[in-house]
Image (cartoon, helix red, strand yellow):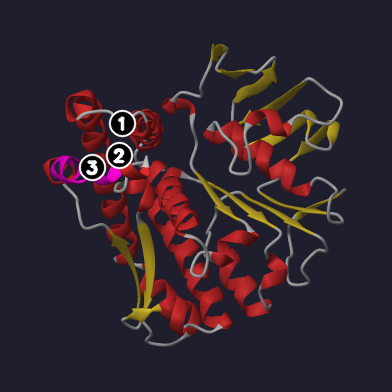
Amino acid sequence: MITSARLQNFRKHPDFQVDFAKKTIITGPNGSGKTSILEAVYLSLIGKSWRSNFEEITRRGADWWRIDVAVGGDKRSVKYQNDAKTFEAQHKNFNRLPAQHKKPVILFEPQDLNLVFGSPARRRDFIDRFAYSFDKNHQKNINKYQRVLKQRNQLLKDQASHDDLFVWDMQFAELASKIIKVRENYISKINEIISGEYQKIAGCSDEVELKYESILKTQQEILDKLYENHALEKSIGHTSIGPHQHDVNFIFNHKDASATVSRGENRTLILALKNSEYALLKDSSPVVLLDDIMSEFDATHQKNLLNGFGDSQIIITSVKPPKNIKNYQKIEL
């Protein structure tokens, strides 16, 4: 459980300290720094922000920032200065937060309501963030993949030959196949329970499914396609296949959800998705961060949302306190 946090030169906060209860709601007008508090908690537990890079977090006029968070019996810090970041956990310093010090987080922010209708990149990011909660190597493989992709694209722009690309193609195909396998694995886990979660919330028999769009799956299939596409990719100057271009589609009653669901069905679908995420993570005691989304739901959906997270620690931000939330510590900015 997160018991306290101190933010220095973090976004709008020159120096701000907050104590958390098991259930906490932070209220205040737009622009008061509510989301920044959740971002600081998320960053201290995961090792990166979901909003931006480290440099953009620095308060205007400052040249450093720092977070200090109490997590159970551990005190951890994140510091950023001179383009360098330092994580401190259990009295040891790291350039990156090691996997053994990362804690599971369920984040629900307003943009999640655009998953069905938004860009493929947003859906890829969601499933990767979810998969990483289980597989600590997944983000590492994605980072390696991005570096290989960048190098391969540069070689293509330089009109590299098959031989010049061979080593990079091997790395690309190996990492791509690993990423695809992990994505498919955790989408299948979601699919085992998401229809039941949706039906429980909506009181209906509608069926929901996530479908991962990937034709090439194995390392050899990807390698063969890279070889086949060599001339095309040299002419366009970038890699034409791979997990960076894949999509995750939502299927509602066997049809594309983006073309069929109503606004209300979309909200229920996303709520069922988050409840499914919690159901798969609950044994690892995730911290639940709900960023300014309560106003998007009516009283019934608010109740379903909060009940869906069981006994986990929940930290909510909201412009105004939702009327049906009781027994929450209230903090006003």
Q: Quadrant of residue 300?
A: bottom right
Name the one closer to the observer, 303 or 227.
227
Residue neighbourhood size for the residue with mark 1, other residues' Cα within 10 Å, grouped as few (<14), some (14–19), many (≥20)? some
Residue type beneath disc 1: Gln
Q: Is residue 317 above or below residue 211?
A: above
Quick check: marks 2 and 3 in contact, CB under 8 Å? yes
| Region of the chain picked out in magenta, as a range | 223-234
**What is the residue that sits farthest to the bottom in this orientation?**
204
Residue neighbourhood size for the residue with mark 3, other residues' Cα within 10 Å, grouped as few (<14), some (14–19), many (≥20)? some
Mark seen at residue 231: 3
Secondary structure, magenta segment, majority class: helix
The span from disc 1 to disc 2 (Cα, nearest Å) is 6 Å
Quick check: marks 1 and 2 in contact, CB under 8 Å? yes
Mark seen at residue 234: 2
Residue 277 visible in this rendered orientation of the protein: yes
Mark seen at residue 224: none
The span from disc 2 to disc 3 (Cα, nearest Å) is 5 Å
Residue neighbourhood size for the residue with mark 2, other residues' Cα within 10 Å, grouped as few (<14), some (14–19), many (≥20)? some
The span from disc 3 to disc 1 (Cα, nearest Å) is 9 Å
Q: Is residue 92 above or below residue 300?
A: above
Q: Is residue 17 left or right of residue 252?
A: right
The percent coordinates of residue 313 (x first, y second) are 60, 49
Element type at mark 2:
helix
Q: Which quadrant is the N terminus positioned in?
A: top right
Mark seen at residue 159: 1
Number of numbered discs overlaid on the protein picture: 3
The percent coordinates of residue 34 (x first, y second) are 78, 48
| Residue at (81, 31) in percent of width and height | 59
Mark nearer the N terminus (3 vs 1): 1
| Residue at (40, 36) in percent of width and height | 139
Residue type beneath disc 3: Ala
Name the one closer to the observer, 47 or 331.
47
